[in-house]
Structures are given as structure tokens and as C-alpha cells.
Amino acid sequence: MTRINVTVDGVDYSDEVEPRTLLVHYLRETLGKTGTVVGCDTSNCGACTVHLDGHSVKSCNVLAVQADGHEVTTIEGIASGGELHPVQKAFHECHALQCGYCTPGMIMQAIDVLGDNPNPSEEEIRVGLEGNLCRCTGYHNIVRAVQQAAGQGATAGAQS
């Protein structure tokens, strides 16, 4: 076992983990952060996307020990003061989900895209979301939601 110290959604944790534990499993099973979805365990779908030190990563491709000493933000940690994050709000308003399985990872990736480029074109949004798969929507409303969030200044407070 290895002790890790990690800040998740603004709360400090210190836990013993098996060195081979994936970050996604640590978040879900140890911390109860079930909004981070296990989709494929192969980094192909992006459903498990979280932010590590402010940048999106697929948590099924990161070991929990690699997060030692770092800050992780999950879908549960992006709302502020009871208000949805602008990207969450835009996904809701633009009907950018159907089954919702990919939505947490898609939102986390969209926040990262907007953090890098606050005013992306449709093509830049599509390229930025490329590693996150949605099996239901065809992406049109997802792209619209990211465009709407960009118009609302979604990068303000997106990541610390």
C-alpha cells in the first residue's frame, strides 16, 4: 500500500491505496465521487474525464499515486454556491445529452477546451472534444452548448 495526499474538489484527502489503483476507481470507490463514470478503462471514451491541476485527463489512464500532491476536480466540484457551472447550465439548456452517460466527462473536457480557447470556432470545439465519445446525440447540441457557454464567459472560474 502507498499513502497518497490529494485535494479533490477542494477537500484534502490522505489515503492508503494499492499502487495499481486507477484514479477513476479511487475517486468512485474510496471518495464516493460517482459522477466520474467508468466507461471503458482503456482511455477511449472519455467518460471518466476529470481535471488534474486544472487540465483534463482521462482518470482511467492515471494511477491514483500519480495524483499524489496534486489537485483533482470532478464533475461534483465545478458548481459554485449552489449554482451550476456555466457549461453545466448550457448543456441543460441546449439539451446536450440523452442518456447522460458521457455528460460528466464531456462537460469536464469542454471546460478545458474553453480554458485554452475562450472563443472557439465550431471546428475547434469538435477537435477539442474529439477524445470524448457520445453514443446518443450526434454532437450537434453538445457543440451548441459549448458555444453558448463560451458566450457566457464559462472560463471565468472554470479552473483554479
Image: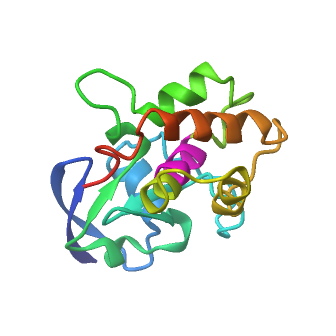
Q: From this viewpoint, is residue 25 visible?
A: no
Task: Please report the residue visible at 44 percent of the width from the left and 78 percent of the height from the top.
Answer: 20
Q: Position of residue 155 (x, y in %)?
A: 38, 47
Task: Please determine whether, in this image, residue 15 is positioned above or below residue 159.
Answer: below
The C terminus, quarter of image: bottom left
Q: Position of residue 44 (x, y in %)?
A: 71, 66
Q: Position of residue 157 (x, y in %)?
A: 28, 44
Magenta stretch: dominant SS? helix
Q: Is residue 110 magenta?
A: yes
Task: Please report the residue visible at 46 percent of the width from the left and 41 percent of the height from the top.
Answer: 34
Task: Please determine whether, in this image, residue 51 is positioned above or below residue 2.
Answer: above
Q: Which of the two residues, 15 or 128, is positioned nearer the viewer here?
A: 128
Q: Which of the two residues, 52 or 15, is positioned nearer the viewer here?
A: 52
Choose top left, top right, bottom left or bottom right for residue 55: bottom left
Q: How many numbered marks have been drawn onto this rendered protein structure?
A: 0
Q: Is residue 54 left or right of residue 89?
A: left
Task: Please determine whether, in this image, residue 67 is positioned above or below residue 123.
Answer: below
Q: Which range is magenta?
A: 104-111
